[in-house]
Amino acid sequence: MDDRDTRRAIRVAGAEPVALWHKDKDLKQVDAVVLCGGFSYGDYLRAGAIARFSPVMDTVIDQARAGMPVLGICNGFQILTEAHLLPGGMLGNDHLHFICRDQKLRVENADTAWTTDYTAGQEIHIPLKNMDGRYVADRRTLDELEAEGRVAFRYVVRGEAADGCGNPNGSLNDIAGITNAAGNVVGLMPHPEHAVEPLIGTGRTDGLPFFTSILKKLVNA
């Protein structure tokens, strides 16, 4: 479902998706990469730990370091941390349960390749579903992320749980998503691809700006 919804989100934004297989080494001249959610390789060892060594990831890593925009959603975020394209790592939710709900987020950085159609401080609702969504990092890394403005999204913790508020998994500093220093690589646990059309789910389209942001960047490059 996650890969199909990601393809649909890209089309809704006005672009054409290209499917890449895990054994591919050629990115087929794509301009940006989305690592979608799911449970790659059954999440054995750790979430994303095996997928990080897929042949396609060698090329993704090289291209990301060269500046190609890369978005990691849920399992994709986990893969990005395992590949060291983003710092820190993901552990099991602090309550030890799978969680699925609409989650309220605050946009912290609207200057990345994937977030320019948002406004810093904007609060949005994005579907969340994970078992290993607790973001962790050492204190030095957390301090660097905060000081450099690399926390892209944060869970809104003040408010009613029924409105999607609260830290859903124990992530340090209430971090829901981060970016690399260059702003071309972004990872987050919630699923923006599930919130791009008003007739689906809760009727919100708060996830669509991820995909329109990158499309505008590529068109105007």
Image (cartoon, helix red, strand yellow):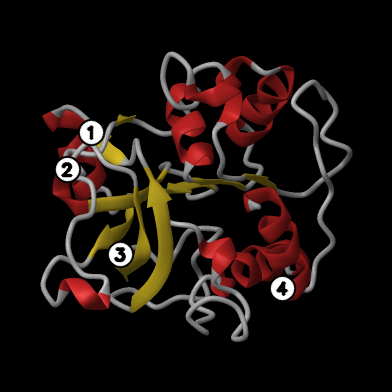
Q: Are marks 2 and 1 in contact (CB under 8 Å)?
A: yes
Q: Position of residue 60 (x, y in %)?
A: 67, 30
In this rendering, position of residue 119 left or right of residue 57: left
- Name the residue carrying label 3: 108
Q: In the image, what residue type sits under mark 1?
A: Val
- Name the residue carrying label 4: 13
- CA gap, disc 2 and disc 4: 32 Å
Q: Which mark is residue 172?
A: 2
Q: In the image, what residue type sits under mark 2?
A: Leu
Q: Which sits earlier in the primary sequence, circle 2 or circle 3?
A: 3
Nearer the observer, 157 or 13:
157
Q: Position of residue 98 (x, y in %)?
A: 33, 44
- CA gap, disc 1 and disc 4: 32 Å
Q: In the image, what residue type sits under mark 4?
A: Ala
Q: Position of residue 76 (x, y in %)?
A: 53, 39
- Name the residue carrying label 1: 136
- CA gap, disc 1 and disc 3: 18 Å
Q: Which sits earlier in the primary sequence, circle 4 or circle 3?
A: 4
The residue located at (88%, 38%) in the rendering is 28
Q: Taking 55 as reference, is 137 above or below it?
A: below
| Disc 3 element | loop
Q: Which sits earlier in the primary sequence, circle 2 or circle 1?
A: 1
Q: Which mark's residue is nearer the viewer, 1 or 3?
A: 1
Quarter where residue 38 is shown: top right
The residue located at (55%, 58%) in the rendering is 113
Q: Taking 68 as reference, is 129 above or below it?
A: below
Check disc 2: other Cα within 10 Å, few if <14, some if 14-19, many if 20+.
Answer: some
The quarter in which the C terminus is drawn is bottom right
- CA gap, disc 4 and disc 3: 22 Å
Q: In the image, what residue type sits under mark 3?
A: Glu
